Image (cartoon, helix red, strand yellow):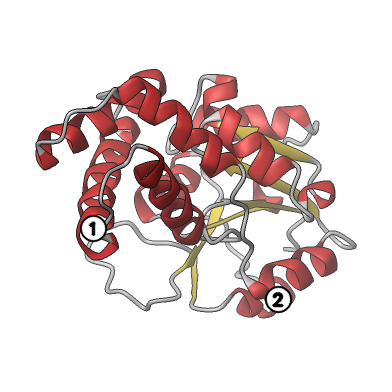
């Protein structure tokens, strides 16, 4: 079996979202005249944001609600009153302008697009991801970039994968590989859609979830070895 389609997650797989998020959050806090302590404030925001995106994956909250709700929770936790909707708007403006790729992402994507059809599926907000991803220096190498808010679907729902493959007129799932850093979103989504998956695990964290990827890598460069010697049975 030779893969033909590679579906990538965007943030924390090809793009350094932590760096983008840190910059955007700091700039927003400062513009709201809040005495910013990165070690304290960013840690709290990370915890709130991770929890609310997990709620979104489980369909407990919509993306439209998520935009503001995370900052309402931040305001409540910090006991600092500010206009959460305005904070959210400014934060997303800063985030849309903060696009940082991992060093190895550019060479990898430039190389792979010569032999494979590439797609990105990202659980994200259109105003943010359109500028950060579609207009990035690697955006031109992807046949399609699917943003969850834009299509009304999100990982791990298999329908977003079906949507992506339909956009490029491809039906053979055995020729498709999903690559991403999230077990619950990227890998579970690929499993739900019955395609092979590759878990990008740069921090080599222990997988205690019961979610089993087809492959696991700790560096993006290892993906080329997998593509040269793929597992023959599709999971």
Q: Tell which of 102 and 187 is nearer to you.
A: 102
Task: Identify which residue is drawn at 24% across, 27% down.
Answer: 82
In this view, the mark in front (2 or 1): 1
Q: Tell which of 67 and 162 is nearer to you.
A: 67
Task: Identify which residue is drawn at 45% across, 43% down.
Answer: 189
Marks 2/1 in contact by CB < 8 Å: the verdict is: no
Q: Residue 66, percent across and down? A: 33, 27
Q: In the shown orientation, is residue 163 left or right of residue 13?
A: right
Quarter of the figure with residue 28: top left
Which mark is on residue 227?
none
Give the total of numbered labels. Answer: 2
Quadrant in which the N terminus appears: bottom right
* Residue beneath disc 2: 224
Q: Is residue 11 above or below residue 62?
A: below
- Can residue 62 be seen by looking at this rendering? no
* Residue beneath disc 1: 43
Q: Is residue 98 above or below residue 168?
A: below
Q: Residues within 10 Å of mark 1 (few under 14, many from 20)?
A: few
Task: Identify which residue is drawn at 76% across, 43% down.
Answer: 135
Q: Secondary structure at mark 1?
A: helix
Q: Residues within 10 Å of mark 2 (few under 14, many from 20)?
A: few
Q: In the shown orientation, is residue 19 left or right of residue 120?
A: left
Q: Secondary structure at mark 2?
A: helix
């Amino acid at each position: 079996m030779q893969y033909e389609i590679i579906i990538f997650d965007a943030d924390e797989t090809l793009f350094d979202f932590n760096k983008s998020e840190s910059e955007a959050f700091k700039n927003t806090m400062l513009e709201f005249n809040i005495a910013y302590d990165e070690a304290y404030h960013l840690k709290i925001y990370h915890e709130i944001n991770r929890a609310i995106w997990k709620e979104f994956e489980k369909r407990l909250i919509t993306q439209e609600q998520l935009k503001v709700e995370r900052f309402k929770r931040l305001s409540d936790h910090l006991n600092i009153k500010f206009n959460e909707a305005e904070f959210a708007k400014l934060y997303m403006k800063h985030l849309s302008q903060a696009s940082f790729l991992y060093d190895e992402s550019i060479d990898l994507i430039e190389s792979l697009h010569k032999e494979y059809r590439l797609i990105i599926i990202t659980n994200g907000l259109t105003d943010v991801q359109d500028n950060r991803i579609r207009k990035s220096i690697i955006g031109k190498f992807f046949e399609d970039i699917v943003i969850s808010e834009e299509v009304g679907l999100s990982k791990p729902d298999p329908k977003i994968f079906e949507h992506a493959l339909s956009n490029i007129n491809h039906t053979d799932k055995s020729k498709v590989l999903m690559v991403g850093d999230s077990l619950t979103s990227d890998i579970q989504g690929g499993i739900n859609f019955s395609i092979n998956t590759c878990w990008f695990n740069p921090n080599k964290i222990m997988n205690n979830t019961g979610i089993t990827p087809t492959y696991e890598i700790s560096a993006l460069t290892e993906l080329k070895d997998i593509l040269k010697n793929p597992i023959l049975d599709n999971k």
